[in-house]
């Protein structure tokens, strides 16, 4: 029981990170129908930006307040990652809009390879580890000498994820930008006819996706304390699995899918075999797509002639 | 779409140079933002193993200036060039028609002839030791990818099923050969077809559950399958020896004569002095024969009913089904044929390297093969060959650029930019020619006369 609760806490933490990345996949797929393969690597780049911002804040500026430092790191990562994803969309995807279906996917795969190798060349192939940012933990309860703990960093991840999801929900549901996004998702040509700037809306979608990925990247760095150039691929595929599981195109689906994938992975590692935890996540992806292609909350895809 | 917008009018009032300068300054500003974190700062480790930051302002400045100058040149050239006449777009290609006819007739035989005499040309120009490198790293490597590209071309180019886990079948072929040859001592010539059969069996096995999926979803599921197979190869250490891989795989023999320095080796029997060169030349011709066979079979398959069914499936699955084509069988044969050629290539790979490990079968490998198919122009056999030469040969050439070290200093290592340039090339070629290098196709079947189909008219890879 204690073990189960502990794994539940760990799973939700991991799931929050996946959920934040999954929103990026699901939004981009919803609006331009493309699997943004480079999104996992954008997440990795954001973790590197957070790492560099963290080093600047702590060693150069000498800010000792953890909350302030974390806040600055988060803002810096979101800002720079958004700029990078904006540029990626502008350079690699926009010229291919209206081209045949595979072209953006291939371009995104190329971008993914480019990003991870760019980071490898620019920052070196070694793992980068930082001292723990947030330390300490609550002991929730303790039986048979097995303490169930909730560390502060897990609490920070839960809190930041919840606040950002609320802000994000507000953005999509209540603002003109969100309305434009939903309009473009339904029918781009019609949206353009009634005065929505489609190009700008798509750009903003990439910016928002990158900002959420940057939050995930910062949280990832804070949680594990280590990042390397190859860390984008597997979390990227898992977050995509989360988006598919929740129903691609559905925003609440992405978050719930993320939590589910986090839980599945954690419990699989805890009760079965840690070696095969990625196999578990990939199998969920395959099984979902084969038996439940529209996901938990997605609309069924109607095949038109 | 932009014409007539306020920005366009303002642009026309300014001089081209001033406008280009404004654009360049803006591009430079964005480049500054883009490169500031990752180029401007370098994370390193100090003596006590702590991360420290150092700055690289000159490098960042160089990046910004390069971007700004490129943008300026581009904008200025575009603004000062007169607007193109609409008629020029439809003008006849400047390439002489006669030369094109000769090329169509003699191009392929010439290319095959060149491939056959390639080892001798290399020896004359590069000498024995240099020639070995050029045959091994260029000739054999490119031909393996020609073979893999042709196999994937059946799945992606002809049947329109986007497969991102193709490397799994390559791995199945390689591990089948390695394990069967080491455990049962079977020969290469027996195991080559067997590896192909096993791979195509896996193609059907993995193809069966994904029959209903299309397009991007299919791509992602095949990617998941590819990764699952790789993870199993890593973790099932009893069978595959995990990360350490399998070494000491028997090499292929020349009709039973091994290529070694023994008395009954190839060199001794033919009265030659022993060098490893004979084995490499033998492997070159072996893979050349296999690649030619693959190309020939693929080209012929396209004319068979099954090949036409594949192409019909690619263009429109619903129409295909309503015409009475069994789409299940059509898809499964495409998966099985594609996987079979990957199995051949895999067993050749294992025999050539004599060592395999899961490291050789990563996703990057699948992406490389897919890039070859798509960049070549999907469905085009010649395109696959050209793209394989360009992508694999191009990245291999980076290993040979020693003179760059004289320019950038001894610490400069061109090979680390290999994958960086590879990714960049994928994006650049997609933007430049989204339909690949060979984008027009001859129809496989025609009524009365043969017409060339422009790429815009076919869906190709609609999925």
Image (cartoon, coloured by chain):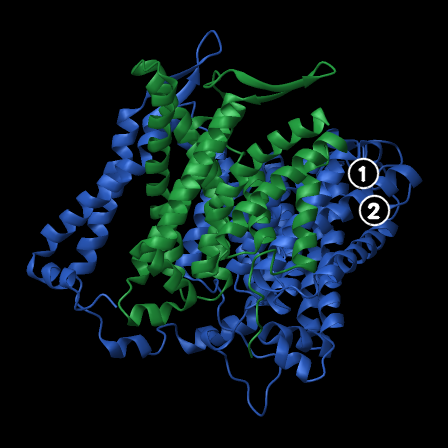
Chain colours: A green, B blue
Q: Image quadrant of residue A75?
A: top left
Please state the horizontal and vertical placement of residue A29, each as a whole percent of the image.
48, 57
- Which element type, helix, strand or loop, lies under badge 2? loop
Q: Residue at x 44, y 30 (%)?
A: A218
Is A69 situated above or below A25? above
Please state the horizontal and vertical placement of residue A114, each as a whole percent of the image.
46, 42
According to the picture, the residue beneath numbered tag 2 turns out to be B254
**The N terminus of chain B: image quadrant:** bottom left
Do the dots labelled 1 and 2 sit on one chain?
yes
Q: Determine the chain carrying the residue at label 2.
A: B
Cα–Cα gap, marks 1 and 2: 8 Å
Mark with earlier residue (1, 2): 2
On screen, residue B48 versus residue B300, left or right, reads left
Please state the horizontal and vertical placement of residue A68, each as a whole percent of the image.
34, 22
According to the picture, the residue beneath numbered tag 1 turns out to be B259
Q: Determine the chain carrying the residue at label 1.
A: B
On screen, residue A245 versus residue A31, left or right, reads right
Q: How many marks?
A: 2
Q: Disc 1 vs disc 2: Cβ atoms closer than 8 Å?
A: yes
Please state the horizontal and vertical placement of residue B191, each as a whole percent of the image.
85, 49
């Amino acid at each position: 029981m204690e073990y189960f609760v502990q794994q539940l806490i760990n799973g939700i933490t991991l799931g929050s990170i996946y959920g934040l990345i999954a929103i990026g996949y699901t939004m981009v797929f919803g609006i331009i129908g493309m699997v943004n393969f480079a999104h996992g690597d954008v997440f990795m780049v954001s973790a590197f930006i957070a790492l560099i911002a963290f080093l600047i804040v702590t060693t150069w500026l000498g800010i000792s307040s953890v909350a302030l430092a974390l806040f600055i790191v988060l803002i810096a990562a979101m800002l720079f990652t958004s700029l990078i994803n904006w540029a990626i969309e502008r350079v690699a995807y926009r010229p291919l809009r209206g081209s045949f279906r595979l072209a953006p996917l291939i371009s995104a795969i190329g971008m993914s390879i480019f990003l991870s190798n760019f980071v490898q060349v620019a920052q070196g192939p070694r793992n980068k580890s930082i001292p723990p940012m947030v330390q300490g933990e609550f002991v929730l309860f303790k039986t048979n000498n097995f303490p169930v703990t909730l560390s502060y960093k897990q609490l920070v991840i839960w809190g930041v994820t919840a606040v950002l999801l609320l802000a994000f929900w507000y953005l999509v549901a209540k603002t003109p930008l969100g309305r434009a996004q939903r309009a473009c998702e339904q029918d781009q040509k019609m949206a353009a006819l009634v005065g929505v700037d489609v190009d700008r809306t798509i750009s903003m979608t990439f910016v928002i996706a990158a900002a959420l990925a940057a939050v995930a990247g910062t949280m990832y760095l804070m949680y594990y304390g280590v990042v390397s150039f190859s860390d984008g691929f597997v979390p990227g595929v898992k977050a995509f699995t989360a988006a598919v599981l929740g129903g691609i195109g559905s925003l609440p689906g992405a978050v719930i899918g993320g939590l589910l994938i986090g839980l599945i992975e954690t419990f699989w590692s805890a009760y079965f075999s840690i070696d095969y935890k990625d196999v578990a996540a990939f199998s969920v992806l395959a099984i979902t797509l084969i038996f439940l292609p529209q996901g938990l909350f997605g609309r069924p895809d109607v095949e038109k002639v | 779409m932009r014409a007539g917008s306020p920005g366009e009018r303002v642009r026309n009032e300014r001089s081209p140079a001033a406008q280009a300068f404004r654009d360049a300054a803006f591009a430079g500003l964005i480049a500054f933002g883009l490169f500031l974190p990752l180029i401007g700062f370098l994370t390193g480790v100090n003596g006590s193993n702590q991360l420290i930051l150092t700055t690289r302002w000159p490098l960042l400045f160089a990046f910004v200036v390069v971007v700004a100058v490129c943008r300026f040149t581009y904008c200025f050239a575009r603004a000062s060039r007169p607007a193109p006449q609409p008629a020029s777009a439809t003008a006849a290609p400047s390439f002489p028609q006669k030369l094109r006819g000769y090329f169509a007739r003699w191009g392929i035989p010439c290319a095959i002839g060149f491939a056959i005499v390639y080892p001798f040309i290399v020896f004359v120009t590069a000498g024995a030791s240099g020639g070995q490198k050029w045959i091994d790293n260029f000739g054999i490597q490119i031909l393996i990818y020609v073979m893999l590209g042709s196999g994937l071309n059946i799945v992606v180019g002809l049947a329109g099923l986007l497969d991102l886990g193709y490397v799994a079948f390559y791995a199945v072929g390689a591990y089948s050969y390695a394990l069967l040859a080491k455990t049962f001592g079977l020969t290469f010539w027996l195991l080559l077809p067997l590896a192909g059969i096993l791979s195509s069996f896996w193609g059907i096995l993995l193809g069966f559950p994904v029959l209903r999926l299309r397009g991007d979803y299919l791509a992602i599921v095949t990617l998941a399958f590819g990764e699952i197979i790789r993870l199993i190869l890593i973790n099932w250490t009893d069978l595959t020896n995990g990360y350490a891989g399998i070494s000491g795989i028997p090499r292929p023999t020349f009709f039973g004569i091994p290529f070694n320095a023994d008395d009954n080796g190839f060199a001794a029997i033919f009265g030659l002095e022993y060098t490893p060169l004979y084995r490499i030349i033998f492997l070159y011709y072996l893979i050349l024969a296999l690649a030619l066979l693959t190309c020939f079979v693929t080209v012929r398959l396209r004319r068979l009913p099954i090949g036409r069914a594949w192409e019909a499936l690619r263009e429109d699955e619903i129409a295909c089904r309503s015409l009475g084509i069994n789409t299940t069988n059509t898809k499964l044969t495409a998966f099985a044929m594609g996987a079979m050629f990957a199995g051949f290539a895999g067993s050749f790979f294992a025999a050539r390297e004599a060592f395999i490990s899961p490291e050789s079968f990563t996703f990057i490998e699948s992406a490389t093969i897919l890039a070859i198919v798509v960049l070549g122009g999907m469905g085009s056999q010649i395109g696959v060959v050209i793209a394989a030469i360009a992508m694999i040969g191009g990245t291999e050439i980076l290993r040979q650029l020693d003179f760059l070290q004289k320019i950038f200093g001894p610490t400069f290592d061109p090979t680390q930019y290999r994958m960086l340039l590879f990714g960049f090339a994928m994006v650049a070629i997609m933007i430049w020619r989204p339909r690949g290098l060979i984008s027009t196709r001859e129809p496989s079947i025609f009524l009365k006369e043969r017409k060339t189909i422009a790429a815009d008219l076919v869906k190709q890879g609609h999925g």
